[in-house]
């Protein structure tokens, strides 16, 4: 079996509307366990588990927790980033729609361990079902005493509210998300200070992805040390993969880190539709690299993905078959970022339209060798100089395609109309 | 303070911790190019021009926002950095109305300068620029979005320094633009027309409305008797426009230059500043002794009046009814002056040179007209526009002789001069009010506690045994603080001076570009130097002002004074038009 169901173990087995069913299936058990532990011991377990953020960047969760725990402010926010806007990603939605209480339990445990006083789940505006399910679940949890004042008879108070944006992609970026919660347009801020120092409403804030919070109860259940044994040494535990594109069996699959991409596509995805030839695979989402067939034996882990100088850890695999032209795909990607750029920094604001114009030349077969050089140079500048993750990662598809599909570019130039 | 060691371009340097890479490099004579960065404003890190390479970091980092750390190795000019910086400036230019030689900011544009220094001889990117309408339906400020590079300085100054929240970013991505709230014209957006946005704009996207042509036309008209008044703050800043050191006092040469430009008479607004003190000082005494509305707030600053009329219409009766010195001059120039020289007021063309963009609007207010038809002041120029005229004429400013102002508005006092700095009106008023009320001379004329760049300053004066508290605020954020107290009835003060611009008029929106706090302090010292060097330093000792009362106005707050020198305000909270 390739799949390993730790955080998706309740998917389809419980009614997500029912807190009773969640409790019956080991729900809120680990919260009680957490309450019996020293706060620092909880963070230690997360550290031993070597849990890395599941939103894409792969930052060690325990370090964020320690940073927040250290802050002495009376108010501290625990933010759950559920603004899953990256094309090709839908695993957070699965988590919220199939097991909403697991998200809440993870947040409560983290809040307890770090002294968080207020939780906010920022849900993508289009996820109406997730929003209503989470609101329902929060109410249920309050009724049962898992949220609110004096949780489970302790002195610990913590409440969670659900917020959502107006659909802007960049609001998934942590500072844009914070701005959006504060009621401002989603535009990033300058770092430092980091959110754990000055976050939402000026208070210390810890931001994690839905999947990261959902993993916390499992870590307490099986212990950090056991968790760390799963996966690879640098990428521990399991990962939810959103598999989409031209595969027969699309969907969300939980796998331990270390599984080759090929197995996900051909075993879990059951191969390419109509058994066509695979042309390329985009990893992580629109902001991820595009790789050719011969690289599919690469295993899924943070370290391998870092090679692409991109944050591809959110776990999307988008399969594209031979019918599609590389440049059509790239144009769609660049236009997406052109539309979603917040406009704050120059390279991202002014660069994407120029990237799109260059790619159009390839689409229309009007490109020259100089255009390849210009494209590569501009893509690298946007990648290296942009203020936030959007512009830093948006050129990844172009940069990686220039590396792995250079023949397509040269072929395109050779077949371009001359004169 | 902890010190940090790092290496910048192979040079070992030691700076205080939390210093930005930008400042650290500057300290060791390595200037990193910037664009959105502006001293005294917040760090935006938007333009990305100041990126540098830091060993061990994958991308390039913006040096304005990145603090130094121990052992850091920085390259500010590696091939990678230079290429990135060049690309960024080319990208900005690809979405900019590049028409440099006919741009108002030609040769003083930060973008142009940057492109030159980076050696951008051609742009690799095709232009994607799309023309947008220009906002120029107010008398003071022109906003040309076609030149805007979205650096955010104007938005920062409007929101964070002035607290007026008129300018904001709209749209996103490539469609991002700076606009007045709800995409209104500035005239409909509660804009106070203070011009601080124009003063920090690195390009020509926000400028004063250029009225120099109107003045040239009047000067060329043989039937017009063209007179000019010059505000106190202009004489300590005009020098910067004509290549002199910041803080140089150029009064005499300025008068000479204006004579050469062709003005028939060159007068000093300091004169009507003295007159203002007599009217306003007496109004204050009248309010105190007759149970009038207190605290009284000053009325010299048109940006503040716009602010109060739109944001605090409920406290308008706290504001002195005195016209500003500019408008007092205007009234006299169209009443007393034509009588005196035997001309028809319609043949007199009155020009003001002000450090201010809001003065252009003030001059167009319908109340500011002696005959009820024609404006008292025909044209208001900023310091920058006067500098432009001097350059247009090719005047060798440095070698000019010094000339005195003309009579009857030529003799002035130090009290009038200090109107140009924050706290100056208050200090000038105290010098007079104290002596009028206590009937004895002040021991020291210098009120140091009212000087300098502190946001809100306070002092106490003894009026006939009663200690009276006064306060001074500059910037509209600080005006807001004092106005809230007045609105809530919790203000502990009797008299409040408010100036819109940081530092007062010397930091006005019409002053030479590149004004920083350091510049402001230099200009302020120059203003107090003018004051200290004056034979007369109290308004009520100005012989020409006293003669004006004797021969024409009769007495402060008298019937004629009231008619010519006082005004009233409107609630513009619903209808904010500043057209």
Image (cartoon, coloured by chain):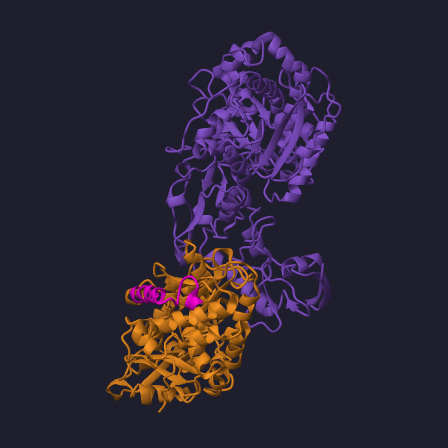
Query: Residue B572's spot in the image, x, y percent?
Result: 40, 31
Q: Nearer the viewer, residue A403 or B58?
A: B58
> Residue A241, located in which quarter of the rendered image?
bottom left
Q: Is residue B402 above or below residue A344?
A: above
Answer yes or no: is residue A392 visible.
Answer: no
Q: Is residue A336 left or right of residue B301?
A: left
Q: Is residue B456 above or below residue A188?
A: above
Asked if residue A373 lies in the magenta stretch, the reply is no
Quadrant placement of the C terminus of chain B: top left
Q: Is residue B526 left or right of residue B227?
A: right
Q: Is residue B554 above or below residue A115?
A: above
Q: Is residue A383 above or below residue B356?
A: below
Colour assignment, chain B: purple
Colour assignment, chain A: orange
Query: Residue A211's spot in the image, x, y percent?
Result: 40, 74
Q: Nearer the viewer, residue B309 or A237?
A: A237
Which residue is at 62% across, 62% downward?
Answer: B67
> Residue A356, located in which quarter of the rendered image?
bottom left
Magenta residues span A132-153
Query: Residue B397's spot in the image, x, y percent?
Result: 67, 34
């Amino acid at each position: 079996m390739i799949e390993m169901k730790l955080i998706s173990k309740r998917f389809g087995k419980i009614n997500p509307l029912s807190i009773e069913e969640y409790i019956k299936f080991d729900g809120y058990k680990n919260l009680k366990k957490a309450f019996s532990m020293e706060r620092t011991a909880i963070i230690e377990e997360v550290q031993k588990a070597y849990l890395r953020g599941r939103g894409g960047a792969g930052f060690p969760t325990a370090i964020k927790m320690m940073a927040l725990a250290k802050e002495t402010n009376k108010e501290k926010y625990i933010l759950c980033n559920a603004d899953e806007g990256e094309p090709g990603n839908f695993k957070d939605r699965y988590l919220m729609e199939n097991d909403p209480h697991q998200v809440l339990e993870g947040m409560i445990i983290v809040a307890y361990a770090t002294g968080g006083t207020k939780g906010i789940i920022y849900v993508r505006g289009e996820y109406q079902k997730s929003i209503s399910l989470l609101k329902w679940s929060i109410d249920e949890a309050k009724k049962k005493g898992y949220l609110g004042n004096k949780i489970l008879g302790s002195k610990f108070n913590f409440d969670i509210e659900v917020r959502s944006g107006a659909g802007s992609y960049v609001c998934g970026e942590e500072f844009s998300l914070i701005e959006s919660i504060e009621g401002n347009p989603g535009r990033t801020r300058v770092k430092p200070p980091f959110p754990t120092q000055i976050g939402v409403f000026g208070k210390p804030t810890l931001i994690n992805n839905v999947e990261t919070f959902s993993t916390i109860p499992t870590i307490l259940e099986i212990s950090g040390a056991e968790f760390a044994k799963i996966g690879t040494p640098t990428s521990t535990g399991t990962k939810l993969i959103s598999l989409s594109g031209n595969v027969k069996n699309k969907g969300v699959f939980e796998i331990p880190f270390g599984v080759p991409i090929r197995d996900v596509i051909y075993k879990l995805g059951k191969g390419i539709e109509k058994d066509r030839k695979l042309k390329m695979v985009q990893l992580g989402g629109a902001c991820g690299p595009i790789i050719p067939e011969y690289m599919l034996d690469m295993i899924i882990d943070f370290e391998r993905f870092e090679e692409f100088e991109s944050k591809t850890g959110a776990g999307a695999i988008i399969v594209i078959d031979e019918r599609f032209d590389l440049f059509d795909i790239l144009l769609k990607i660049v236009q997406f970022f052109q539309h979603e750029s917040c406009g704050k920094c120059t390279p991202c604001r002014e660069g994407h339209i120029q990237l799109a114009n260059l790619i159009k030349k390839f689409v229309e077969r009007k490109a020259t060798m100089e255009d390849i050089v210009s494209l590569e140079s501009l893509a690298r500048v946007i990648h290296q100089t942009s203020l936030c993750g959007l512009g830093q990662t948006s050129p990844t598809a172009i940069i990686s395609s220039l590396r792995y599909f250079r023949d397509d570019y040269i072929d395109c130039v050779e077949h371009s109309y001359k004169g | 303070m902890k010190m940090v060691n790092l290496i910048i371009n192979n040079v070992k340097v030691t700076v205080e911790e939390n210093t930005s890479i930008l400042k650290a490099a500057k300290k060791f004579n390595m200037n990193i190019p910037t664009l959105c960065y502006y001293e005294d404003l917040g760090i935006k890190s938007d333009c990305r021009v100041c990126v540098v390479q830091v060993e061990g970091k994958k991308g390039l980092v913006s040096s304005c926002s990145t603090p130094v750390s121990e052992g850091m190795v920085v390259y500010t000019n590696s091939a990678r950095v230079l290429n990135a910086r060049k690309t960024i400036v080319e990208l900005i230019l690809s979405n900019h109305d590049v028409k440099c030689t006919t741009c108002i900011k030609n040769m003083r544009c930060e973008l142009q300068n940057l492109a030159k220094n980076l050696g951008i001889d051609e742009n690799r990117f095709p232009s994607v620029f799309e023309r947008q309408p220009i906002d120029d339906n107010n008398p003071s400020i022109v906003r040309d979005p076609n030149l805007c590079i979205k650096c955010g300085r104007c938005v920062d100054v409007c929101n964070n320094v002035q607290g007026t929240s008129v300018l904001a970013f709209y749209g996103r991505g490539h469609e991002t633009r700076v606009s007045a709230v709800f995409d209104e014209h500035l005239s409909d957006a509660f804009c106070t027309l203070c011009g601080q946005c124009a003063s920090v704009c690195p390009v020509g996207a926000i400028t004063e409305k250029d009225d120099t042509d109107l003045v040239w036309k009047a000067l060329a008209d043989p039937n017009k008797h063209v007179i000019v008044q010059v505000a106190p703050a202009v004489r300590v800043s005009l020098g910067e426009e004509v290549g002199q050191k910041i803080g140089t006092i150029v009064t005499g040469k300025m008068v000479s230059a204006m004579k050469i430009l062709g003005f028939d008479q060159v007068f000093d607004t300091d004169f009507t500043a003295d007159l203002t003190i007599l009217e306003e000082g007496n109004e204050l005494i009248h309010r105190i002794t007759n149970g009038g509305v207190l605290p009284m707030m000053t009325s010299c600053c048109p940006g503040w009046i716009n602010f109060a009329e739109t944001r605090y219409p409920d406290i308008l009766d706290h504001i002195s009814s005195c016209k500003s010195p500019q408008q007092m001059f205007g009234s006299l120039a169209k009443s007393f002056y034509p009588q005196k020289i035997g001309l028809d007021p319609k043949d007199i063309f009155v020009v003001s040179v002000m450090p201010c963009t809001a003065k252009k609007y003030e001059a167009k207010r319908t109340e500011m007209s002696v005959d009820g038809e024609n404006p008292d002041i025909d044209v208001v120029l900023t310091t920058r526009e006067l500098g432009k005229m001097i350059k247009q004429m090719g005047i060798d400013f440095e070698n000019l002789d010094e000339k005195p102002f003309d009579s009857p508005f030529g003799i002035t006092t130090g009290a009038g001069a200090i109107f140009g700095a924050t706290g100056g009106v208050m200090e000038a008023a105290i010098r007079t009010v104290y002596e009028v009320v206590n009937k004895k001379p002040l021991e020291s004329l210098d009120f140091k506690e009212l000087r300098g760049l502190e946001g809100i300053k306070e002092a106490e004066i003894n009026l006939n045994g009663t200690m009276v508290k006064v306060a001074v605020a500059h910037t509209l954020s600080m005006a807001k603080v004092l106005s809230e107290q007045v609105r809530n009835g919790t203000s502990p003060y009797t008299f409040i001076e408010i100036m819109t611009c940081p530092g007062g008029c010397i930091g006005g929106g019409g002053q030479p570009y590149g004004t920083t706090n350091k510049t402001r302090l230099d200009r302020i010292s120059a203003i107090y130097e003018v004051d200290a060097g004056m034979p007369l330093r109290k308004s009520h000792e100005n012989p020409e002002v006293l003669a004006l009362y004797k021969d024409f106005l009769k007495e402060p707050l008298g019937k004629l004074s009231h008619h010519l020198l006082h005004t009233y305000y409107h609630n513009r909270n619903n209808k904010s038009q500043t057209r």
